[in-house]
């Protein structure tokens, strides 16, 4: 246990805090594996089913399904977050992963003859599950950390812990991609989806058992809100968004940047990868390679972030990060200079050793642009990690515990609201020009960076409270002085 506490920077933490960190880390990594194992081919699998094995044709319908998922998540995201504040995060997590269990099992049944309405149902279930899951784990950690670690007043240990956890997150993400692609190649993609359904069911049971507050947090929160306070929690969370210019611009700007990442991951990323690399294992191998430095960056980001002042560096890191404005513009240039190889291009084929199973097929013309993409990922990957740690440090003390889960769930809700019109527009534009789509997304992302910069120029909410307390103290001292003077005279 000593090595674990040393690794996470928790050598002097209380045993219950160490246990909290251990449960959070183990469960978060298990969740990551359960989702990441099929991320390489999930979207392409659905697109091929809709396009009669032509994923580019099917992407038109995938755009519609993504909007369905986002609308459902938008509708339920904030209410389920508030219910998490009201009932407790473990119940929300349990129901979320039960819903994922049903959704992944239904995905495993999808074929080219599957009715479109069944896919609508699947994406609606995914959206509902996401709405329950979002913010729950982070809220549980933050509530307990803030109460049980008052000595970490600048949240530097918190930042180091998140950085170390991020390293493990990317490590598991990296290690599971190629096995996921190989399993899909050997046993079929539906088999992997069924495996995910089993893992999600296990996570649901574990969440009920282990996601519990520490004693100090229980004492603080032992009085649960009444039903009448349910709507008060909703109102307070929304009011927090507009409570100050600092919160408003920083939050909305961050969500605008993240909405562009959503467009990248839901519309562009995998169709572009498969256009250049063709097979599950090839795409998984590419993703593994570009994630290797992220393992190191994530481990170091919490430590390196100590050197940077959030007000100055958050907007800069958001602009430079992977899936940020500069990143989109560079990828647009790559696609213009190196177009997607046409059918019939010379190929490099690799079979699974001892079999005739084709696991790797790469056009020779794809090698150079893919190498350039890898270099870009290596160069800008650290900035996403640094921006995330700095932003977490800023918000951990700015959000009241009572509405924390509701506010954390509000974050992805805002992202979804901003993503839906973009996906509707770019879902059409991508069929005309992917580079033009990337250029426009980069412009939107840079607007978010400017909003973040503006928000950080305003006083932090805690600074406003401290200033108000100082003014009140001065007024009291002044009144007491006047009273003493009056009595003397």
Image (cartoon, rainbow, N blue to C red):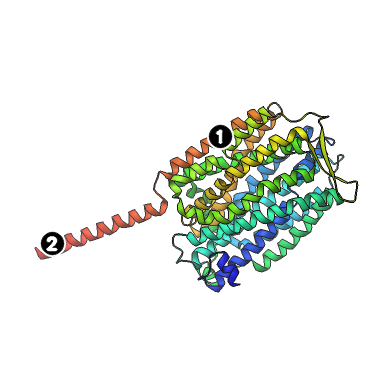
Residue 368 at x, y percent in the picture: 70, 35
Which SS class for mark 2?
helix
Name the residue nearer the viewer: 484 or 2: 2
Residue 202 at x, y percent in the picture: 74, 63
Residue 12 at x, y percent in the picture: 50, 71
**Where is mark 1, residue-wise?**
444
Farthest residue toward the left?
A: 489
**Where is mark 2, residue-wise?**
486
Quarter of the picture holding the C terminus: bottom left
Q: Nearer the viewer, mark 1 or mark 2?
A: 1
Count every numbered label the image shows and give the total: 2
278 lies left or right of 301 = right
> Which residue is found at the position 74% from the left and 51% from the top?
177
Neighbourhood count class around disc 2 (C-alpha, 10 Å): few under 14, some 14–19, many 20 upward: few
Name the residue nearer the viewer: 347 or 216: 347
Q: Is residue 14 visible?
A: yes
Q: Where is 3 relative to 92, above or below?
A: below
Which SS class for mark 1?
helix
> Which residue is found at the position 66% from the left and 46% from the top?
290
Residue 67 at x, y percent in the picture: 68, 39
Any mark on residue 203, and which?
none
Q: Earlier in the sequence, mark 1 or mark 2?
A: 1
């Amino acid at each position: 246990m000593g090595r674990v506490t040393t690794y996470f920077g928790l050598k002097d933490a209380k045993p219950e805090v160490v246990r909290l960190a251990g449960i959070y880390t183990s469960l978060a990594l298990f969740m990551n594996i359960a989702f990441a194992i099929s991320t390489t081919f999930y979207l392409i699998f659905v697109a091929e089913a809709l396009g009669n094995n032509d994923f580019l044709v099917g992407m038109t319908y995938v755009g519609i399904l993504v909007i369905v998922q986002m609308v459902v998540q938008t509708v339920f995201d904030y209410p389920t977050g508030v219910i998490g504040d009201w009932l407790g995060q473990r119940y929300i997590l349990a129901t979320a992963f039960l819903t994922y269990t049903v959704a992944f099992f239904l995905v495993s049944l999808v074929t080219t003859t599957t009715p479109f309405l069944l896919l609508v149902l699947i994406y609606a279930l995914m959206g509902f599950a996401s709405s329950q899951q979002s913010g729950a784990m982070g809220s549980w950690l933050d509530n307990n950390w803030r109460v049980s670690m008052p000595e970490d007043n600048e949240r530097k240990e918190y930042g180091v812990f998140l950085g170390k956890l991020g390293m493990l997150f990317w490590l598991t993400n990296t290690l599971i991609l190629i096995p996921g692609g190989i399993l899909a190649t050997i046993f079929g993609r539906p088999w992997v989806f069924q495996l995910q359904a089993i893992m999600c069911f296990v996570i649901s049971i574990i969440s009920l058992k282990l996601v519990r507050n520490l004693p100090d947090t229980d004492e603080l929160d032992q009085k649960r809100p009444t039903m009448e306070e349910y709507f008060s929690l909703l109102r307070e969370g929304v009011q927090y968004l507009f409570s100050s210019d600092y919160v408003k611009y920083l939050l909305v700007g961050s969500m605008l940047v993240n909405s562009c990442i959503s467009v990248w991951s839901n519309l562009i990323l995998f169709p572009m990868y498969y256009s250049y690399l063709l097979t599950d294992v090839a795409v998984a191998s590419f993703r593994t390679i570009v994630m290797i430095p992220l393992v190191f960056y994530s481990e170091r980001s919490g430590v390196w972030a100590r050197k940077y002042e959030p007000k100055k560096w958050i907007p800069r890191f958001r602009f430079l990060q992977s899936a940020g404005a500069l990143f989109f513009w560079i990828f647009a240039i790559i696609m213009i200079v190196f177009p997607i190889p046409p059918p019939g291009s010379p190929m490099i084929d690799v079979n699974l050793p001892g079999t005739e199973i084709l696991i790797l097929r790469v056009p020779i013309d794809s090698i150079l642009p893919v190498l350039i993409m890898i270099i870009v990922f290596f160069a800008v990957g650290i900035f996403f990690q640094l921006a995330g740690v700095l932003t977490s440090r800023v918000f951990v003390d700015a959000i009241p515990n009572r509405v924390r889960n509701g506010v954390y769930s509000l974050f992805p809700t805002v992202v979804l609201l901003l993503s839906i019109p973009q996906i509707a527009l770019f879902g059409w534009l991508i069929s005309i020009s992917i580079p033009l789509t990337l250029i426009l997304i980069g412009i939107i992302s840079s607007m978010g960076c400017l909003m973040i910069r503006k928000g950080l120029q305003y006083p932090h909410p805690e600074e406003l409270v401290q200033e108000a307390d100082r003014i009140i103290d001065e007024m009291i001292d002044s009144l007491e002085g006047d009273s003493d003077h009056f009595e003397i005279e």
